[in-house]
Image (cartoon, rainbow, N blue to C red):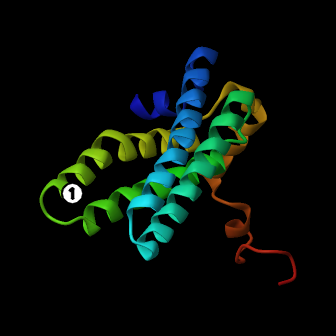
Amino acid sequence: MALLAFNSPCGTARLRTWQARLLTGAGLALLPWMGFLAATLPPGRAAAWVALDSLEAACLLTAGTRLARGGGGHRVAAAGAALLLAADACADVLTSAPGTELAAAVAMAVCAELPLAGLCAFLAVRAHPEDGPAHAQAVRAHAKDGPAHAKAGRAPGPAGL
């Protein structure tokens, strides 16, 4: 029963709007955070963290704006954001010094990064009414039969390679 509910189309336009605003707001919130990191961390560490947060912001803003417009164009960006947010949470916790720095990293991971990563992963795989019945039918056929290249006995890739 849970699998049926998970694969059912997203409920209302109001929920979709809320999700889009949350993703867009999180992406925008990362912009001043990157400035703070650049100003307070040593240059080498700042470059790495700002680069990671820039990619997260780009994915979140792309997913949020595409989700607001409707259709399934948000999925790749949401999947990328989920991956980057989960990696960021792990890296924050693993590179933090014991004490208050570690406590802050765990709090940030548990309260912000991982829940947002979960929402992004959920949105990346969730069916939406705007995708139409043809998309839903293709997803069911793929899940049932597997990808077309597997049935043909060849590796995926461009024809002739």
In-image side of 63 versus 130 (left or right): left
Q: What is the quadrant of residue 65 in the picture? A: top right
Q: Residue at x 46, y 48 (%)?
A: 33
* Front position in the image: 39 or 113: 39
Q: Residue furthest right?
A: 160
Label 1: element kind: helix
Q: Position of residue 64 (x, y in %)?
A: 63, 36
Q: Position of residue 50 (x, y in %)?
A: 51, 62
Q: What is the quadrant of residue 90 in the picture? A: bottom left
Q: Where is mark 1, residue-wise?
A: 101
Q: Residue at x 87, y 82 (%)?
A: 160
Q: Residue furthest left?
A: 99
Q: Is residue 25 visible?
A: yes
Location of the N terminus by quadrant is top left
Q: Residue at x 46, y 64 (%)?
A: 49
Crowdedness of circle 1 by 10 Å Cα count: few (<14), some, many (20+)? some
In-image side of 6 versus 73 (left or right): left
Q: Is residue 126 visible?
A: no
Q: Position of residue 95 (x, y in %)?
A: 28, 68
* Front position in the image: 96 or 64: 96
Q: Residue furthest front?
A: 39
How many labels, in total? Answer: 1
Q: Residue at x 64, y 17 (%)?
A: 13
Location of the C terminus by quadrant is bottom right
Residue 85 higher or lower than 46, as above or below = above
